[in-house]
Amino acid sequence: MYYLISSHKSLSAYVVPDELPDVKIPISVIISARNEAKNLNENLPSILQQNYPDFEVVVINDCSYDSSDVVLEVLKETYPHLKIVTITEHERFKTGKKFALTLGIKAAKNEHLIFTDADCRPASSSWITRMAAHFNNEVHIVLGYSPYYKTGNFLNSIIRFETLKTAINYLSAALNGDAYMGIGRNLGYTKTLFFANKGFAAHMHVMSGDDDLFVNQNATATNTDIEIHQDAFVFTSAKTTLVALYRQKKRHMGVGKLYKNTHRRLLSFDALSGFIFYGLFIWSLVYYFEPLFALGLFFFRWILQIIIYRKTFKKLNAASQLWYLPFFDFVYYIYINVFGFIGTFVKTTQWK
């Protein structure tokens, strides 16, 4: 409850400007893709057709052995502002996403960069405009929101809720002047910031972290802003099997141990306190130890969550999930503790 009140209330109070800003700074959209022919064919046109006066789209074809090169060349005939950077497999070393992104950033002609993935699609043609509007002389990092498409799958509901809670955490932290991560599916920063801090050099040995570790190491109280207008959402499809989800989360959770100490302690505090809360609640009911007091705390916390989260869930287009909050919140704390434990001991050696 302390974490909820001290951190998350800022996002609830945040006012999302509805008027479309007038922005004209040149933008480079960066996408790293490995064997993404189908996704590039389906999603890249929605990015190339953005309603923005001055932008290019840089796609790094990272050692693909499918038909990605053909798809990109066909699209380039229609969209001249598409720039293709091709990486071929080297016998002596394996490349990773960070290497690909670094080449894409070097190839980009513009100072202001926006990142997404090949399997992502912006919610509207105003995505670039709304993200770019936050850049100024002081703001060098823009954090966006990237939800998953909704399906009838139960696993999909769990994944979407975990993504929602993660977004609430990192967006609230940014509003509180302590940004600790971002999501590479919808993220912006400047080329100057990237090269001034030696890019991904500090964590190049880790396969993941091109988004969250970069933000964790380079965000300050004044150089980071957020964009959560629903026109600026970037959607993608969630994993449909537990095996695929395990591989994805194992890759993501493994970088958490490299966060700044203050951020690791804060996230651990939230994860463990939630896990212990539900564990003690169930124990109290099973062993009939002050059950009325336990139920009272449970409902008090639930009501407090509804009060604080009601506006936030609506802003993030997840109002329907508020009604299932007690169940999903319980599963969420099991979920992040299990994967957090796994990420502590498992090392990932490939990004795709």
Image: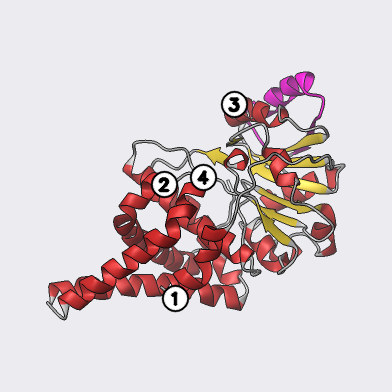
Q: Amino acid at mark 2?
A: Ala
For the point 58% across and 45% down, which residue is it? 352
Sequence order check, earlier mark of 3 and 2: 3
Report crowding for label 2: few under 14, some 14 to 19, many 20 or more residues within 10 A (C-alpha). Answer: some
Q: Secondary structure at mark 3?
A: helix
Task: Give residue 319's mark.
Answer: 2
Sequence order check, earlier mark of 4 and 2: 4
List the residue tagged with mark 4.
147
In the rendered view, tell whether residue 52 sits above or below residue 71: below
Q: Nearer the viewer, mark 3 or mark 2?
A: 2
**Structural distance between the alpha carbons of marks 3 and 2:** 28 Å
Q: Is residue 244 left or right of residue 302?
A: right
Q: Is residue 17 left or right of residue 200?
A: left
List the residue tagged with mark 1.
2
For the point 44% across and 61% down, which residue is it? 308
Residue 254 position in % (x across, y down): 53, 63
Sequence order check, earlier mark of 1 and 2: 1
Q: Nearer the viewer, mark 4 or mark 3?
A: 4
Residue 45 position in % (x across, y down): 67, 26
For the residues bearing labels 3 and 2, Cβ distance under 8 angstroms = no
Report crowding for label 4: few under 14, some 14 to 19, many 20 or more residues within 10 A (C-alpha). Answer: many
List the residue tagged with mark 3.
42
**Structural distance between the alpha carbons of marks 1 and 4:** 26 Å
Question: Total of numbered circles in the picture?
Answer: 4
Q: Which residues are magenta?
A: 60-87
Residue placed most toward the observer, 327 or 193: 327
Image quadrant containing the N terminus: bottom left
